[in-house]
Image (cartoon, rainbow, N blue to C red):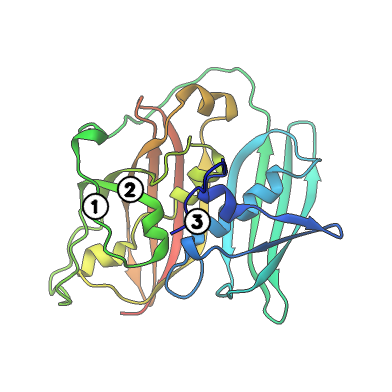
Amino acid sequence: MLEKTPGDSVHPFDRATKTTTIDGRLHGTASEDYWAFVGPFGGATGATLLRAMIEHPDRAGDPLTVTVNFCAPLARAEFQVNVRLLRANRSSQHWMAELAQEDNGVVAFATAVFATRRESWSHQQTAMPAAPLAGQIAPLPNAGIANWTQQYQFRFVEGTPDYNGGTRREIPASAFSKMWLSDATPRPVDFLSLLSMSDTFFARIFHVLGVIVPIGTVSLTTAFHADATDLAAEDTTTVLGVADANIFHKNYSDQIGQLWAPSGRLLATTTQVCYFKA
């Protein structure tokens, strides 16, 4: 497990999602600490792409929405990220970032819309789901399922995973879950962590069938409902995450989710399409 060394102020998540400019191109290497079953955790890959866009010198404003498409497993090798501004106007920018490997082509790409929010009438239509305080719930024990799960603390309020028996449920259970979520090494919540946390919800089919089956995120979209100033004001390392699904059909399912600040502010909503084999 990657940890801070004496005198090292870089958080494991920031180290895993950073790139280095070499000869005018962005280069990086997938982190073993965020490894999943057949490649890196999709949330970390998405955050790597978003970081590359945020750090581009021509970027203006904060991300409003990001869509990450996963094309192929990322191999244990160096990768390159190519970022380009597709279009800009006075109110928004549209960006694309591609992550590719030699002999493997493009393995993931993201599109994002950035804008500078201005003061306006505001109204939060939905209320934060009820939940005990995070400190009142014990974290999920580390089961060693995948390296990336060790980088987060999961404190389940509802829908605690229960698929150690290995027997598929004859009657499907609920796909809903509610949990407090934070980095294992505390880190202030920002756009990068919110995007990554959008993919931390365990696959809904695991909850429904009660067993682990082959799965993979195909496409992930996250909409942010706060700007950088709002996130700084929240000053939190923990969010309440709720997730559910509508349908599982012919090898694909959806997933919908919300990420809430402890104050009751809705920070992000997310949806994804997931492949499964069952």
Identify which amino acid the numbered label 1 is placed on.
Answer: Leu
Is residue 179 shown to the viewer in this render?
yes
Q: 77 or 234, which lies in front?
A: 77
In-image side of 178 versus 165 (left or right): right
x 69%, y 55%: residue: 19
Whichever of callouts 1 and 3 sits on the residue coming sooner in the sequence is: 3
| Res 153 label | 2
* Residue 253 occupies quadrant: bottom left
Is residue 131 shown to the viewer in this render?
no
* Residue 143 occupies quadrant: bottom left
x 80%, y 41%: residue: 57
Residue linked to disc 3:
43
Quarter of the image for the N terminus: give it: bottom left
Q: Is residue 208 depicted above or below 55 in this figure?
A: below
Asked if the residues shown at circle 2 and circle 1 are in contact, with their CB atoms under 8 angstroms apart, the answer is yes
Identify which amino acid the numbered label 2 is placed on.
Answer: Gln
Residue linked to disc 1:
140
Whichever of callouts 3 and 2 sits on the residue coming sooner in the sequence is: 3
Q: 83 or 139, which lies in front?
A: 139
x 53%, y 25%: residue: 232
Spatial separation of the CA atoms under disc 1 and disc 3: 19 Å
Asked if the residues shown at circle 3 and circle 2 are in contact, with their CB atoms under 8 angstroms apart, the answer is no
Quarter of the image for the C terminus: give it: bottom left
* Residue 22 occupies quadrant: bottom right
